[in-house]
Image: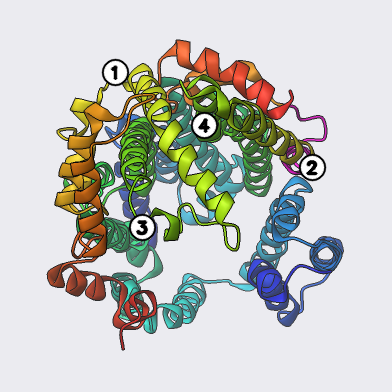
Amino acid sequence: MDQRHQEYLDYYRVRMSKYENNPLYKNSYQSEKSTFDALNSCENLEEFRSKLGNENLPLKNAVALTRDQSLARKELYEAIKEFIRKKAPEQILEMTETVQTVNELTKRANEIGAAVSIEIAIDLMTSYFYNDFLVLENIEVWQNAEIPAEWYKEIREEWVQETIAEGRKTWQNSVVPESQKWSSDWKFNFDLIWEDRHRRLIPVPDDVVKKRIQQFKTYRGI
Amino acid sequence: MPVEKQYSDSMLGAFRNMYQDLFDKKAEGETFEKLKAILDRMEQLAIEMDDLSSFSTKLTTEGLFVNFSNYYSEVAGEMAAKQYTKISSDEELMEQTLIAYESSLKNYEKEPKQKSLYDTMKQIIDLGRSGISYPVFLRICEEKGLYKLLEGGEVTRNGLLEEKTFNEIFSLPIYLKKTEELIKAHDDLAAQSPFNTPDSFQFGLERIRIDWYYAPIQSRWDAISHGWEKLLELLFDWLDSFCDFAPMDFRWVALGDPARTRHNIKRTNDCNPGFLKERERIFYEKFQLKWEDVFTHETFLNEYKAGRIWYSDEVLALIKETYPLCKPYSKPTTELIKHAEDIHHNKRFQRVNSFQLTEENKKRLQDLIGKEKFDQIYGQK
């Protein structure tokens, strides 16, 4: 083995060892080990260069690292029940099974990331509900507060009706058209409120959420 | 009307530079033409669309960002590949690598916060220029963790330390706990690394987990704070609405319409007790907290300590005294009203130095954000 061959062997050994015993990088370790073994089994560097190309080793290394990182992301999102965000690593993992070049790997991973980020943006529109809590509480106070009868018309009727009219107008003229720029058939999905990723950010008991859903429907005219 | 130029420039600037970079390097071919078509489409949308939010949405939903990036990678990758096929030796490969690093080095030169990246890159270049072979250079870079250091672990940690200082200055306890935990996660990962810098991917996962953990805690904190702020406001307004200054106070005055002003005052006189009871009911329904829990609750104590309670201690005491009387169809006593009038006329209603930073914190903030920015915000020369 000539000196340059030995120097490259030392370099690939270091690359391999940086993933050794790290459970997050199992695939990367195996892949880097294959590259190291390939180099170690070659008579000379010329043979190794052909092997690199013929066995597509750079792609295998890139795929291995992508798979390790996607698996880790998938596991984390699964654990924290972020099921929309989990779609990106899931789809990337699927894609890595058929990808042919490093360029294609990068390109398709970017495309998946971009497509899922749009789904995330749409999913986040569920927060419209909690964002309305302050105004929904105002309406509840005006409707239920024990006040002298002479104020009923102004507070229980006019204030409530004006606020609801404004809420419906904003919803129809602004919120819905803006949201449909992200997805043309978008409409508010009430089931999503109960998904853990959204429900956990609403710091009130279920009974209050149920009540607010009905109030939100009235306020926004949905 | 097009999107304002300053906004479209800031959104498209990087893409224009990337295009220009390829153009200057004499890029050509079908992919480069597609890239140019995408940039043209972005420019066209900037002219046709009238608001930034719609413009930004359109760039994302039409996939223009991602397609531009993909075509850029493809063109740049092909050009680099062509360049590398011309390279016949490790020595030429080393030279090309070092030229690329030397070119990047200039970007870090003038930015003090990027000093660690500058130093690492300089170390890589010096190593490459020391006369060693290309594989030895690559090996030492790996062994010394120089590539890992280029991931910017130190820059990230410094950013977290700044965030921690900011949260301390402004007494934001949940954000502070979160930042402390992020720093700990960063340090734990660094301790596991032979290069004393964390794997940036692993730290990214930790950041997601920690952000996720604290999000509902912060949400509850904010909602509770808002709940008791509303109760205090209703009581303060109720008592003041019986005072002699009420007809001149901005809370009730309807300019040029004294009858309307009287109407507004009467509404507060009559309705705030009912509003208060209903707000208390909602506060309890949401958080199982009562009026008597407010002043010992961690959210109140924190805001008090941070100087973010606008009311003076005397007003707070008066509010507490007023509370038992604030019931539907009731009125405050004459003594309470007189006391409120005295406080108002002698301007003792607002806490001294409320919403002001202490001298020590002013200094810390100035060190953190720089004197120029500090003066812009706080109007000091």
Pinpoint the chain carrying mark 1: B
Marks 3 and 1 share the same chain:
yes
How far apart in space, not on screen, are marks 4 and 3 (Cα)? 27 Å
Pinpoint the chain carrying mark 3: B
Q: What residue did someone put label 1 on?
A: B288
Q: Toward which corner of the image does residue B275 lie, by quadrant?
A: top left
Q: Position of residue A158 (x, y in %)?
A: 67, 33
Q: Earlier in the sequence, mark 2 or mark 4?
A: 4
Q: What residue did someone put label 2 on?
A: A173
How far apart in space, not on screen, are marks 2 and 3 (Cα)? 42 Å
Quadrant housing the C terminus of chain B = bottom left
Identify which amino acid the numbered label 3 is placed on: Phe
Marks 2 and 1 share the same chain:
no
Q: Earlier in the sequence, mark 3 or mark 1?
A: 3
Q: What residue did someone put label 4 on?
A: A138
Residue found 54% across the figure and 14% down from its top: A211
Q: Position of residue B153 (x, y in %)?
A: 30, 57
Question: Magenta segment: does it hold A212?
Answer: no
Q: Position of residue B155 (x, y in %)?
A: 31, 63
Pinpoint the chain carrying mark 4: A
Residue B89 appears in view: yes
How many numbered discs sit on the rendered protein? Answer: 4
Identify which amino acid the numbered label 1 is placed on: Gln
The one nearer the camera, B305 or B64, is: B305
Q: Is residue A48 left or right of residue B138?
A: right
Residue B18 appears in view: no
Quick check: marks 2 and 1 in contact, CB under 8 Å?
no
Identify which amino acid the numbered label 2 is placed on: Asn
